[in-house]
Image: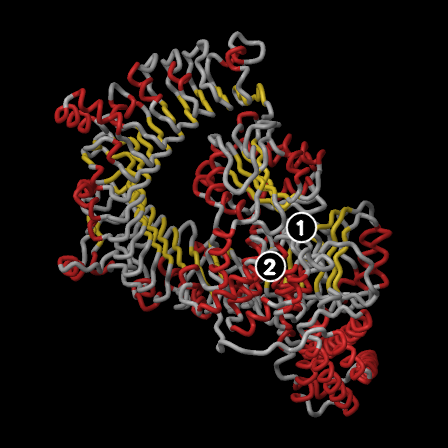
């Protein structure tokens, strides 16, 4: 920070000047001596501000200048501390609730305030110090001119400014191949290296405990975490793994804490109270019970730094307790090749910087509002952007940070200054600061610089949460509200999230330090804290034994009157009482004691704004928690939150995820009455305990204008209660569950009351007989209607036409018979326009067996995904409509007993086709006619190709058909899963040659003892096949002999083949790398002592009934 301290002073000065000016302007009758000192302080701070601005945007390397600026900075912060004393003294007398607003609000009561002597003495000392420093400012300016080696740049070119918010979605460029490769590795079908990684990636190398461990290795900022997020959130991973967890691994790895975080993630409802006092054995027992209950799991260990060999073995042993969990995956991101070699069971993914052809579009996306938008930008700006992009070395994080910086300052002059920054001359960085971070800091406003510099105290690999860091900034008055969400702020968060800061470096701290993070397990080192009298931030990390830690903590808190942020959530220490001096922390605003489980927790500081008490049950919460009048954010487990009596006293609270209405003083729904600042999502449960409409109205939901989402549910939700729970018209998401009346209250039936609604869900409304007019809501995009057993008729006129709806779900509406189309929509459709569901992209109709008609299947011009299960006769309209659904990419039909003939000519854009348990469905054409199909699943469909086979042989003759079949196929199909629906008789001939097929799963062919000669020839035509799985073919006695002629196959899986007693000689594919056998009678024969071992010994990886028999590194 020595190189950039000049600009950091400005932000501190601005805050101090604002406070001094506020006192002077609004409190004319304060004591004369106080007014005199405050006026003098204002003058001195104004001079300091001018000096700090003169030092702005310069790389200051002169040691004398740096030292002088440090003194100036310390004096300014001391001035801010002195002014804070006035604020706290005044607040303690007036008893105001909103202490944070005193700076900008009236301080009328200060007129009669007698300022304590110690506060006056401190103010006098500050003014004296600043007077002395300002007297030498002329010398500083002269030295600054000598140190500045660059003349002022000329301003030329384009004028004008523009700004933009950071897009919500995250775009990934240039990682498509490696993403697909990792997904294949997880599925067990990878066979070649992806682009952007080193040779040998992904090959079977070594394994432990039947878990696949795949490391992603690369330098900082190359995109490891982003790639892991893409994989973690990929639909295939979500579908394949019932348990997923993400753990950010700190430099000081704690096996117990990591296991608790995994357990919390595996817990579906996240309401389990984690107890840090649990023994390791208790934690392991809970976690193993979750694993056994949840089949395979997918775990990401992000940013691993330490080798942790012993801890790693412990982790794997715990997670692999049940051998049947074979197939679980751990994805590890790290910068260390050595760590990757220690943990890997396959060769790592070595992630490289992006090539220019991928990096340039990524940079354009961040700097120009998107690649397409960049084409509209002035040519000179585009060239300047390209010049800057070439300095970033292909690092995605650098593109994001610098791109967001440029986009927020869209002018030629500022872009030119970025391009010509001195920082680019330091190719490898300067004093640990990478060039693009130095450039970013250099062009930040004072407000942003202060936030950026604050983050440097966090240790390496600190788990950053954006909201949490913003709350710390607010606690220090760096910013004013949680609305601080611009592109630069997000870039700062991204920077430190990826470990790009120089934070975590151990170094001696000066005695006037104000922000400190201490990583140690030694109380001797902790004793050093006693000499730091001006601490504002204290973050403690480490494990301590014995009772001395709390004595030390008591002493430190008593010695640090300026403390605003205290985080002990990463401390492991014996359960003891809360320090006696804690209540004396009058300025403390952010406190995190999560999982510390301190006994007798009481007397919390009254000015707290943020309180974290995760891991505390209700019995351990402080009784006075509802007296924290300034509390904005309270983080406790749901089970404890519901037992806080009188939570409505926390009127400044901004987050309350869940409220359970109960009977009894301090627990009724009236507690919500004065909580007007609530934001985000609120779920109100226990509505059955509300006794009247008037009681429900006392919740005053109409007053909660910041609330974004509302969930209302209970065992029974009566109409009178719902009548009184009308939300503010700005509500965007509304969910109602277990409503008990036939008709909704008037506020639901009048669209004007919910004009801004985007997301609506009605569920388990047992008696509801008519739907509210949700289709008239102009902005509604998502609608889910589930378990509505009394709905029989939907009137299109009253229900509406849904002008903005994109996703619609009807599930288990089992008596629904009819949905009539609005007359106006029908007339518009006749003239070629679309007024009814015209923007619908996803439609899910599940268990609506009596529905006779779905209005206007053909009138869904942008429908992309259609899922139908247990349909009524409305599905008979589908074949005539499919050719009009030009955007349809996914079709899934389940449990359909209606006779239906579908033609491939109707599926112009179809990529994914699932037909499951559809006894009456036939395809009029063979699979080779599906020109765009990528994935297919066909099971339980005995008639599926009967029509196609009859037409083909009748129209062409057998020989001509055979010849045509050899040349055709669904060229893009890569995944096929089928049972005897496609493999019975000669139906398989209708599938085609499938030149791109990579994965084939054949299952449940009950009567076949072997594959026919024609079927074996067909197998040989699958020239790209990499993985073949044969499952539950109970009568099968031998494998296809054609496997020996299939060099592309890398993985063979055999499951539930009870009559397969042995392997014939030379029966396996020649390049097989992985053999998985489960619940087959030949299992004992392929062990190292078995009769068939010689037939499989060449296979590098062999897994039999969950046990690894062989694993050879290639």
Which badge, 1 or 2, comes first in the chain's sequence?
Answer: 1
Quarter of the image that includes the C terminus: top right
Q: Nearer the viewer, residue 870 or 409?
A: 409
Vertical comparison of 745 with 213: above or below: below
- Tell me the residue that label 1 is attached to: 461
Q: Which residue sits at x=84%, y=53%?
A: 525
Vertical comparison of 592 with 925: above or below: below
451 left or right of 726 in image? right
Callout 1: SS? loop
Callout 2: SS? helix
Report whether residue 629 is seen.
no
168 left or right of 138 in image? left
Percent x, y of residue 435: 65, 60
Quarter of the image for residue 405 reads bottom right
Bin the neighbour count of mark 1 within 10 Å (Cα to Cα): few under 14, some 14-19, many 20 and up. Answer: many
- Tell me the residue that label 2 is attached to: 493
Bin the neighbour count of mark 2 within 10 Å (Cα to Cα): few under 14, some 14-19, many 20 and up. Answer: many
Q: Which residue sits at x=41%, y=24%?
A: 1029
Percent x, y of residue 887: 28, 49
Percent x, y of residue 1109: 57, 19
């Amino acid at each position: 920070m020595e190189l950039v301290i000049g600009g950091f002073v400005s932000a501190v000065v601005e805050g101090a000047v604002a406070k001094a000016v506020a006192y002077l302007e609004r409190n004319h009758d304060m004591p004369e001596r106080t007014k005199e000192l405050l006026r003098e302080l204002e003058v001195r701070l104004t001079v300091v501000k001018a000096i700090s601005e003169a030092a702005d945007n310069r790389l200051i390397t002169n040691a004398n200048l740096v030292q002088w600026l440090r003194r100036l900075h310390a004096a300014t912060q001391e001035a801010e501390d002195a002014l804070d004393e006035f604020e706290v003294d005044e607040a303690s007398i007036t008893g105001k609730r909103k202490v944070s607003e005193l700076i900008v609000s009236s301080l009328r009561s200060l007129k009669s305030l007698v300022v304590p002597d110690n506060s006056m003495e401190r103010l006098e000392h500050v003014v004296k110090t600043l007077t002395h420093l300002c007297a030498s400012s002329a010398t500083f300016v002269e030295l600054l001119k000598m140190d500045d080696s660059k003349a002022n740049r000329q301003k030329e070119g384009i004028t004008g400014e523009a700004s933009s918010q950071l897009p919500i979605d995250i775009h990934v460029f240039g990682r498509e191949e490696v993403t697909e490769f990792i997904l294949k590795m997880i599925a067990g079908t990878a066979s070649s290296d992806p682009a952007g990684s080193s040779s040998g990636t992904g090959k079977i190398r070594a394994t432990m405990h039947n878990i696949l461990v795949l490391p992603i290795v690369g330098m900082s900022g190359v995109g490891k975490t982003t790639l892991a997020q893409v994989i973690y959130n990929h639909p295939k991973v979500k579908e394949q793994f019932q348990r997923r967890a993400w753990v950010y691994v700190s430099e000081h790895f704690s096996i117990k804490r990591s296991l608790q975080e995994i357990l919390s993630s595996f817990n579906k409802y996240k309401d389990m109270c984690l107890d840090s006092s649990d023994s390791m054995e208790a934690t392991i027992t809970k976690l193993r019970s979750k694993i056994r209950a949840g089949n395979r799991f997918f775990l990401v260990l992000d940013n691993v730094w330490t080798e942790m060999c012993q801890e790693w073995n412990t982790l794997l042993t715990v997670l692999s307790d049940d051998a049947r969990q074979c197939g679980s995956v751990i994805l590890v991101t790290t910068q260390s090749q050595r760590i990757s070699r220690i943990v890997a069971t396959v060769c790592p993914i070595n992630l490289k910087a992006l090539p220019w052809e991928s990096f340039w579009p990524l940079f354009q996306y961040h700097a120009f509002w998107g690649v397409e938008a960049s084409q509209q930008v002035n040519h000179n700006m585009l060239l300047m952007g390209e010049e800057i992009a070439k300095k970033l070395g292909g690092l995605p994080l650098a593109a994001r940070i610098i791109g967001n910086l440029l986009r927020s300052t869209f002018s030629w002059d500022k872009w030119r200054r970025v391009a010509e920054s001195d920082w680019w001359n330091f190719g490898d960085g300067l004093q640990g600061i990478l060039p693009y971070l130095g450039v970013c800091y250099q062009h930040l406003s004072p407000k942003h610089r202060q936030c950026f510099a604050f983050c440097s105290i966090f240790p390496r690999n600190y788990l950053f949460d954006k909201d949490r860091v913003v709350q710390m900034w607010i606690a220090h008055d760096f910013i004013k509200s949680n609305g601080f969400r611009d592109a630069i702020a997000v870039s700062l968060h991204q920077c430190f999230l990826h470990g790009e800061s120089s934070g975590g470096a151990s170094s001696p701290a000066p005695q006037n330090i104000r922000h400190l993070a201490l990583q140690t397990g030694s109380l001797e080192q902790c004793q050093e804290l006693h000499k730091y009298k001006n601490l504002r931030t204290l973050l403690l990390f480490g494990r301590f034994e014995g009772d001395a830690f709390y004595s030390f903590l008591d002493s430190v808190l008593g010695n640090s009157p300026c403390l605003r942020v205290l985080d002990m959530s990463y401390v492991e220490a014996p359960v003891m009482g809360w320090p006696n001096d804690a209540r004396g922390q009058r300025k403390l605003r952010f406190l995190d004691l999560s999982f510390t489980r301190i006994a007798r927790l009481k007397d919390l500081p009254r000015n707290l704004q943020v309180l974290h008490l995760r891991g505390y049950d209700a019995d351990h919460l402080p009784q006075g928690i509802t007296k924290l009048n300034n509390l904005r954010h309270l983080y406790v487990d749901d089970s404890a939150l519901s037992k806080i009596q009188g939570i409505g006293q926390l009127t400044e609270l901004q987050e309350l995820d869940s409220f359970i209405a109960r009977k009894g003083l301090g627990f009724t729904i009236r507690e919500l009455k004065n909580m007007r600042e609530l934001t985000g999502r609120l779920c109100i449960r226990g509505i059955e305990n509300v006794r009247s409409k008037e009681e429900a109205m006392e919740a005053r939901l109409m007053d909660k204008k910041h609330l974004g989402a509302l969930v209302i549910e209970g065992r029974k939700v009566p109409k009178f209660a719902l009548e009184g729970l009308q939300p503010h018209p700005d509500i965007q998401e509304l969910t109602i569950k277990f409503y008990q009346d036939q008709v909704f209250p008037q506020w639901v039936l009048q669209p004007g009351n919910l004009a801004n609604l985007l997301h609506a869900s009605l569920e388990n409304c047992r008696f509801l007989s008519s739907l509210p007019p949700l289709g008239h809501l102009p902005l509604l995009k998502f609608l889910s209607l589930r378990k509505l057993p009394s709905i029989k008729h939907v009137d299109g006129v009253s229900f509406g036409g849904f002008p903005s709806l994109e996703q619609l779900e009807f599930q288990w509406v089992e008596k629904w018979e009819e949905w009539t189309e609005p007359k106006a929509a029908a007339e518009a459709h006749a003239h070629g326009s679309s007024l009814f569901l015209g923007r619908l992209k996803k439609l899910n109709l599940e268990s609506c067996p009596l529905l006779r008609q779905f209005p206007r299947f053909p009138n869904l011009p942008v429908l992309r995904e259609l899922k139908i299960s247990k349909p009524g006769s409305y599905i008979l309209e589908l074949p005539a409509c499919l050719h009009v659904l030009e955007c349809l990419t996914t079709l899934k039909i389940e449990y359909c007993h209606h006779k239906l003939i579908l033609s491939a000519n109707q599926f112009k854009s179809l990529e994914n086709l699932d037909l499951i348990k559809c006894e009456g469905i036939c395809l009029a054409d063979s699979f080779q006619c599906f020109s765009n199909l990528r994935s297919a699943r066909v099971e339980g469909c005995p008639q599926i190709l009967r029509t196609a086979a009859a037409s083909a042989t009748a129209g062409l003759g057998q020989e001509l058909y055979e010849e045509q079949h050899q040349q055709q196929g669904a060229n893009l199909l890569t995944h096929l899963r089928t049972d005897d629906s496609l493999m019975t008789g000669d139906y398989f001939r209708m599938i085609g040659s499938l030149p791109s097929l990579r994965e084939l799963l054949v299952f449940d062919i009950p009567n076949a003892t072997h594959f026919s000669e024609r079927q074996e020839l067909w197998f040989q035509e699958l020239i790209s096949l990499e993985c073949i799985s044969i499952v539950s073919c109970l009568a099968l006695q031998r494998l296809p002999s054609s496997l020996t002629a299939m060099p592309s196959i890398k993985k063979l899986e055999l499951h539930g083949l009870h009559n397969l007693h042995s392997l014939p000689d030379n029966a396996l594919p020649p390049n097989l790398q992985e053999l998985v056998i489960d619940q087959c009678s030949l299992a004992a024969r392929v062990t190292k002592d078995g009769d068939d071992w010689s037939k499989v010994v060449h296979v590098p990886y062999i897994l039999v009934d969950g046990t690894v028999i062989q694993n050879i590194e290639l």
